[in-house]
Amino acid sequence: MTALLEVRDLSKDYPARDGKGVVRAVSNVSLALEAGQTLGVVGESGCGKSTLARLIMRLIEPRSGEILFKGQNLVSLSAPDLRRRRRDIQMVFQDPYASLDPRMNVAAIISEPLDIHGIGSRAERKAKVLELLDLVGLDRSAAAKYPHEFSGGQRQRIGIARAIALEPKLVVLDEPVSALDVSIQSQILNLLIDLKKRLGLTYIFISHDLSVVEHVSDDVAVMYLGQIVEYGKAAQVLHAPLHPYSQALVSAIPEIDTQKKKQRIVLTGDPPNPENIPPGCPFHPRCPHVMAICRQIPPELQVTQDRRAACHLYREGPGGH
Amino acid sequence: MTPGPLLSVEGLSVAFNTEQGRVRVVEDLSFQLAAGETLGLVGESGCGKSVTAQTIMRLLPSPPSHIEAGRIMFEGEDLAAAPASRMRKIRGDRIGMVFQEPMTSLNPTQRIGQQVAEVLRLHRGMNSSEAKGLAISVLKKAGIGNAERRFDQYPHELSGGLRQRVMIAMAIVCGPRLLIADEPTTALDVTIQAQIIELLKAVQKDLGLSILLITHDLGVVAEMCRNVVIMYAGRVVERGPTNETFQFPRHPYTAGLINSSPRNARKGERLPTIPGLVPPPGMRSRGCSFADRCPRVLEKCRSEFPPLAPLPGRLVACWNPAP
Ligand SMILES: Nc1ncnc2c1ncn2[C@@H]1O[C@H](COP(=O)(O)OP(=O)(O)OP(=O)(O)O)[C@@H](O)[C@H]1O
Ligand code: SF4
Ligand SMILES: [Mg+2]
């Protein structure tokens, strides 16, 4: 089965703030996603999650690498071909306040992608907007209102309606519930779960909240300083992580159920700085298992069965050291 | 004789003057905090957690805010009635404060060490070399490595986690009895959050502090607080020991909050939700504010307000609490 989306060795640099060096925002990221699946991407601020999302959306140019959508490389596509392809990939953003134009009413916001792609007659577009409002659980009267008249959760529904207006195949969700309160968060997660089933969507779900990611994802990629350090089935990565960074991340989540309490690995050292990526393994200055080799040689993603971890502890494969 | 609580908030109501007139955002709030205890104050956005914290510290300007009723007893003194000059003495000395966004509470143009030392000069009348020595030792206690060098840095030169450590150093430098921490880890990444949680626990043990911890993260509460107060729409709806309250919530809202976390759900399935939205202040009904969203609602709930009443090991404001 061919993947719906395959990313190969994708890299993106930005000029550093000091004007001299570069920030390696995304380095050699590879991943694959089959139709109907959800890939969770986790990691802390600055690890490159949102840059990866924007690369896949083709909102920014990669330095190198390929983004294959249904086998077609989006990076080398001509402008008109890319425009057509864009319909298939849509995005939902974290901040439902910043991502909606306050001067447009909801009908205009939701139908804008349809207008841009010249889809349907005016009447058809109007009908489509109402259908989308139903689909995301908003009252039809919302069409004539403006974003400021809605709560955070309702605005996120508007953002989702807009994202699915073009009937995309892939939706990239960048922290879609992070700005919401828990009771509203669960409403939006349910909506995303329902829509995925009904419309046969494929998701890339970016979040720093591991319990949310675990709930929705089939596979999970853990990013650290622009690289994927661990990648595999959600249950395995989040319950029996291999990479010392994933282990620390998982152990850091405070549990509601104190019976479930796990041994916490508290990392020492400063948080990672993408402007100053250490040589060797990028995690080595904070790693509790650091070895001499880690300071010099960058570990590669070791592949065994369904698991991959970029760590010298697993040179002979997971469990092989 | 057992000593009374360090902090006792009794029937506190706070209102704001708004364009819609005077609106109560905190109503008849009561809770106690014993010496050495960490109490969690949880609830969703807008439920009045920060207004409560800022009222205890008397940081809200009046007008537009008004303490309409209640007492805030701290070390035998009613802070609700204390004059501004007295509050300036108490804040930073007897009560330390840590907020979500250290960048807004730190002075961007002043070296961080000076800011810590300033607290000592203000409250202890220390000269600058005494203050500097003590400030450095407290920065170290707050887990800031290389404190001598960091002393001369500016806030923007530090990471979010380090800035929060500076805030904690400033809050504890005078040896307060009470620390009020309003979402102290919300802006931080989880691995840094874990460091700050460990630091707060260590500081508390070390100084025998009481902590009022405000957060919307139930996990953080479960980890740090023996007792918890759950707020909804400006009121306390449930109060009790954290473990039992989270395991066997009695108020339907508490139950809804806990059940809607994906932590407790079957993977990939719909989550239990609380339908609808929190009513905004000023639109709250005569009866229970939760009635429109409540799965256990009775006729009575809509007309009559449920008072906070004792159940075994718990206080619950509900006409029909979960069994
Ligand atoms: N200066 C003000 N004037 C009018 N209303 C205010 C003012 N400050 C706060 N409020 C209102 O008081 C209510 C309680 O706000 P508060 O900031 O205490 O909530 P919170 O529980 O801390 O929420 P969050 O989790 O978002 O921090 C809200 O409805 C808010 O809009
Ligand atoms: S008082 Fe009634 S409406 Fe309010 S929480 Fe209890 S059962 Fe629900
Ligand atoms: Mg607040």
Image: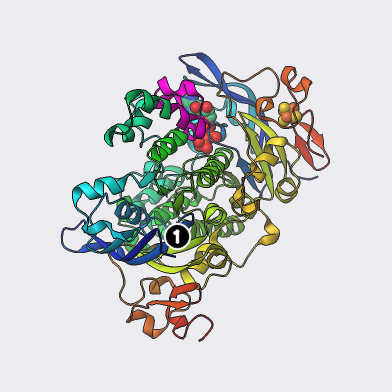
> Is the residue indicated by label 1 positioned so its CB lies within 8 Å of ligand 1?
no
Amino acid type of disc 1?
Glu
Dominant secondary structure (helix, strand or loop) of the stretch shown in magenta:
helix
Q: Horizontally, is A81 left or right of A321 in the view?
A: left
Q: Horizontally, is A146 left or right of B37 in the view?
A: left
What color scheme is it?
A: rainbow
Q: Is residue A283 above or below residue A160?
A: below
Q: Horizontally, is A62 left or right of B33 in the view?
A: left
- Pick the residue in front: B85 or A145: A145
- Residue B45 falls inside the magenta stretch: no
**Location of residue B122 in the rendering, given as x and y in whole percent from the top left corner:** 42, 43
The region drawn magenta spans A129-154
Residue B288 location, quadrant:
top right
User: Is any atom of residue A243 visible in this view?
Assistant: no
Q: Residue at x 51, y 53 (%)?
A: A209
Q: Which residue is mark 1?
A: A34
- Picture quarter with ligand 2: top right
